[in-house]
Image: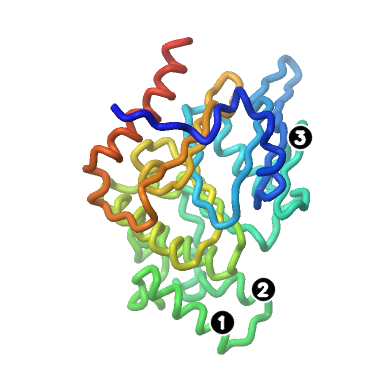
């Protein structure tokens, strides 16, 4: 098996100040502690992450490692107990128009058509009708649902609903797209097609994407960089660069290069369980 060098071992992160200064997103020494009347639980401990502009990163790790919690803190929906999160060197204190989010559950407004769902954020901005229609047409074409513009969510499959959710998020032109296991409930065939579509949209639009998943194959196919988490408490174990080129087809999953990356990530995750 080929040796895959991670960007850095998180046990030795000193000397990263120069690269951190150039980062689009910085998570600096993040702790997340939950307190109850009887106990204190540390969910995330001393996590520092730097993400470059236009990057596509996946966060992967076992259940309970804090993947979704990190994403919610990036969205401004939750906050660290200690440390800070910076986007464009501005501290995250609340949700913002610079970030879009796509959840695993289908979050479309059921009383709105596909077109109306995509327009929702644009209407809040009071965008001119002609410009709004142009953007909606663009994303309906991108997600290949032009014929369904007047359909309601109840008339769509799961994969189609998630395509609309992605289009709705991208229509607002966020700098950062946060995705919390958005394909987790889909069948394998639909999931693969959604992964391919997302890569194609990312190559055209180039938002910075942070994608949480527990699926190793999905992380290797989608990401340029994978953040591998450990648990009890949640820590950043290693950062792995996925150097397989930008133009990826589903056939790449059958190559030895892909298989070796998958094995490497699996070993990182398995090693943790072996140590417990």
Badge nearest the viewer, 1 or 2? 1
3D distance between C-alphas at marks 2 and 3: 33 Å
Please report whichever mark, 1 or 2, sits nearer to the chain's N-terminal start.
2
3D distance between C-alphas at marks 1 and 3: 39 Å
Please report whichever mark, 2 or 3, sits nearer to the chain's N-terminal start.
3
**Residue 166 appears left or right of 53:** left
SS label for mark 3: strand
Query: Residue 144's spot in the image, x, y percent?
Result: 34, 71
Marker disc for residue 83: 3
Crowd rating for badge 1 (residues with CA inside 10 Å; few <14, some 14–19, many 20+): many
Marker disc for residue 132: 1
Q: Along the line of sight, which residue is nearer the eye, 240 or 33?
A: 240
Query: Residue 217's spot in the image, x, y percent?
Result: 34, 39
What residue is drawn where x is 44% and y is 63%?
Answer: 203
**Residue 20 appears left or right of 151:** right
Badge nearest the viewer, 1 or 3? 3
Please report whichever mark, 1 or 3, sits nearer to the chain's N-terminal start.
3
Marker disc for residue 145: none
Q: Which residue is mark 2?
A: 124
Judged from this view, the residue extending furthest toward the bottom is: 130
Please tell me whether residue 122 is drawn above or below residue 274 in the rendered image. Answer: below
Badge nearest the viewer, 2 or 3? 3
């Amino acid at each position: 098996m080929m040796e895959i060098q991670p960007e850095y071992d998180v046990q030795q992160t000193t000397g990263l100040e120069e690269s951190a200064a150039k980062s689009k997103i910085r998570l600096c020494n993040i702790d997340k502690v939950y307190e109850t009347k009887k106990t204190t639980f540390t969910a995330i401990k001393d996590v520092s992450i730097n993400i470059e502009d236009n990057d596509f990163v996946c966060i992967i790790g076992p259940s309970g490692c804090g993947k979704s919690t990190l994403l919610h803190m990036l969205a401004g929906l939750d906050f660290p107990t200690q440390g800070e999160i910076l986007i464009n060197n501005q501290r995250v204190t609340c949700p913002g128009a610079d970030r879009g989010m796509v959840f695993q559950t289908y979050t479309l407004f059921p009383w709105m058509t596909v077109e109306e769902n995509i327009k929702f954020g644009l209407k809040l901005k009071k965008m001119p009708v002609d410009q709004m229609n142009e953007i909606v047409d663009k994303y309906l074409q991108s997600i290949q649902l032009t014929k369904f513009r007047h359909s309601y969510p109840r008339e769509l499959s799961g994969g189609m609903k998630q395509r609309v959710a992605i289009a709705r998020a991208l229509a607002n032109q966020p700098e950062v797209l946060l995705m919390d296991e958005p394909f987790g409930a889909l069948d394998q065939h639909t999931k693969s097609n959604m992964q391919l579509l997302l890569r194609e949209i990312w190559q055209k639009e180039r938002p910075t994407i942070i994608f949480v998943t527990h699926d190793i194959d999905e992380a290797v196919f989608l990401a340029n960089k994978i953040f591998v988490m450990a648990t009890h408490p949640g820590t950043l174990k290693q950062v792995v660069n996925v150097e397989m080129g930008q133009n990826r087809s589903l056939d790449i999953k059958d190559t030895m290069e892909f298989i070796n990356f998958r094995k490497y990530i699996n070993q990182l995750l398995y090693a943790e369980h072996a140590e417990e």
